[in-house]
Image (cartoon, rainbow, N blue to C red):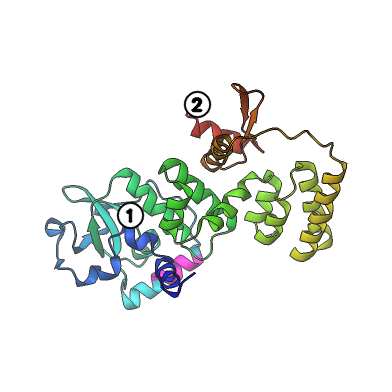
Amino acid sequence: MSEEKKAKRKNALGRGLGALLANESEAPQRRRVSGAGAAVTGNIGEISLDQIEVNPFQPRTDFNEEALQELSESIKIQGIIQPITVRKLGTGKYQLISGERRFQASKLAGLEKVPAYIREADDQQMLEMALIENIQRENLNSIEIALSYQRLMNECKLKQEELGDRVGKNRTTVNNYLRLLKLPPDIQIALRDGKLSMGHARAIINIENVDLQLDVFKKILAEDLSVRKVEALVRSLTNKEEKTAPKKPEKEFSPELKKLQESLSSYFGTKVIVHQKSKDNGDITIPYFSTEDLNRILEILDM
């Protein structure tokens, strides 16, 4: 990769939400307005808290009470340094796009008004911005990130490459997170609860047999295995599977069908299998690994 491309990549990282919010870092330079009646789209205005509705598309509903109280105390002393972002609904009514922690902490601090950057956004943009803001939080676990990526792809109709551009990640990183959702529920819960690292999970997912995945998972917990030891264990298991598995005669697989299989796998977020029985017929298999995974696929199919 050239130095110029590296520089472009570096500049793109973490830019997703800022780009969607029309570069909020420049917002304070815009003309300020005072009073609810004077609040104009594209400006920063002081808006009454009772005129602001929470974002119905906010994917994160749990806020740490202690951290919220600390932020509230800081706001009492220093005020709100970074304005929240809202969209205008109608006369004197606004809806949060980003900054719900600041909004909630301001209520706790007893503020009546908060500085807000006012912009236009439709429902899909609201959902997209809320999800991206959620992803960019530092304390998200890998399953929360994966689920947010999945929602962005399914509900905002984004492809993996487009999603990568939005969140400042390459397609491989995005795919690594999405693959976690193929793991059995027990393993996903352990990831969510911090009992298992993403490195462990990425090793386990290379095992195709679900029972074997769970066996390795239990062994990790029982023996406190490192990621390297798990990777070595998985390699030995997969090699054993390859040796014992009956060899199937290879069939001619056209480039068109291969491309179709890759596209379907990307679209459904799981390894879709296209099986060509003869020249003009075959079948398509979409595997699922849990009830939630099945429901996710059915939602994509609009069933």
Instruction: Find residue 202 and report its image quarter.
Output: bottom right
> Image point 33% across, 48% down: which residue?
125
Please give left or right for residue 9 compared with residue 21 in the image. right
Q: Is residue 39 above or below residue 121?
A: below
Under mark 1, the amino acid is Ile
The label nearer to you, 1 versus 2, is 2
> How many circles with numbers are drawn on the protein?
2
In front of the other: 35 or 13:
13
Q: Which residue is mark 1?
A: 97
In front of the other: 233 or 222:
233
Mark yes or no: residue 213 visible: yes
Mark yes or no: residue 113 visible: no
Q: Which residue is mark 2?
A: 303
Q: Which residues are magenta?
A: 66-72
Q: Main secondary structure of the magenta part?
A: helix
In front of the other: 59 or 79:
59
Q: Indicate yes or no whether the magenta region holds residue 70.
A: yes
Q: Is residue 283 above or below residue 210?
A: above
Please give left or right for residue 7 compared with residue 281 in the image. left
Where residue 61 sits: x, y (%)? 47, 52
> Image point 45% across, 46% down: which residue?
159
Q: Indicate yes or no whether the magenta region holds residue 121.
A: no
SS of the residue under disc 1? strand
Q: Is residue 270 above or below residue 44?
A: above
